[in-house]
Amino acid sequence: MSQSTSPSTGQKYGLVRVCQVWGISRSTHYARKASAESAPGRRGPVGFHSDDELLDHIAACIQSSPFTGEGYRKVWARLRFDGIRTSPQRTLRLMRENNLLAVRNPGRPHGPKAHDGTIKTERVDEMWGTDMTTTMTAREGNASIFLAVDHCSLECVGIHAAKYGTRFEALEPVRQGVRHSFGAFGPAVAEGLTLRHDNGSQYVSSVFQEEISFLGIQSSPSFVREPQGNGIAERFVRTLKENLLWIRRFDTVEELRLALLEFKDTYNREWIIGRHGYKTPSAVRAIQKEAVNVAA
């Protein structure tokens, strides 16, 4: 059907559009196509739970999660937290067969990369990323949202909403993070921390740069027109939109601000990170800080 031509436009429908109408992911389409073309292989050992029982647990896990769009690996990890043992491959198979996989919308490359390497760190409070986004409120119109995220634990260390996106409002999540992570607010209290940001007018302003310098934070602007240079914060913005901004209505900026703080607490407490053994951001920070205290 994806190769069929639309009578109104004269163009092919395309696989992306067809999968959206069917309500399935493209990976599910390709998997079903491959399984139909290949002979069935020898099945492995049967697990403790039958497919129907495990499917019920998977559906309950998806329903109880405070987040949307989580992949099969996170579902598998949450099942393990509940004492339900199975394999990632079996979890993937059942989710695929029952249209439970999250729909993916991968981006497209926009030319050669301006840099290589990674901005992930191995220790908390070595680098934070800060960024902003906007949303609409029903009564007060446009609102600006500023945030700061740790590049190791992916913890949201600060988040703030305001009517106007000024340089002063952009500093608020950084101030929250400094008080949270360093326990004080003063000259050079955050020395050793690097702050990654884009080249927005709020972040390159003298007010913003002078305050983070006062705190001992080193400024690290990303490359122009290279959003992946601030990818940690950009990814958190996407998570925030998918799990809060796109699914809830806010009447006022204050209502939005309170909802953001609530989301921040839920995210830090319950979001799980694959590269840290499916631990939460708060757990990663606690483990690293405890190790530092023991070593001291």
Image (cartoon, helix red, strand yellow):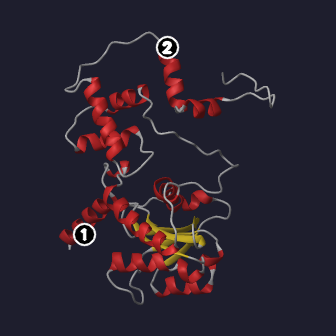
Which residue, given by chain and number where applicable, does mark 2 sit on?
36
In the picture, measured across the screen, residue 280 lies left or right of residue 22, that is left
Q: At 76% across and 27% down in the image, what residue appears?
A: 6
Q: Which of these two is toward me, 125 or 37?
A: 37
- Dividing the image into 4 quarters, which one contains the C terminus? bottom left
Rendered position, 96 above or below 153: above
Residue 82, percent across and down?
22, 43
Q: Residues within 10 Å of mark 1 (few under 14, many from 20)?
A: few
Q: At 28% across and 35% down in the image, what residue appears?
A: 57
Residue 219, percent across and down?
54, 76
Q: In terms of image quadrants, where is residue 159?
A: bottom left
Q: Which of these two is toward me, 287 or 68?
A: 68
Residue 39, percent across and down?
44, 9
For the residues carrying marks 1 and 2, which lies nearer the camera in this image? 2
The answer to whether marks 1 and 2 mark residues whose Cβ atoms lie closer than 8 Å is: no
Amino acid beneath label 2: Ala
Which residue, given by chain and number where applicable, does mark 1 sit on?
292
| First reached walking from the N terminus: tag 1 or tag 2 | 2
In the picture, measured across the screen, residue 58 lies left or right of residue 149, that is left
Amino acid beneath label 1: Val
Give the farthest residue toward the top. Answer: 39
Q: At 59% across and 34% down in the image, what residue appears?
A: 20
Residue 121, percent across and down?
42, 61
Give the farthest residue toward the bottom. Answer: 187
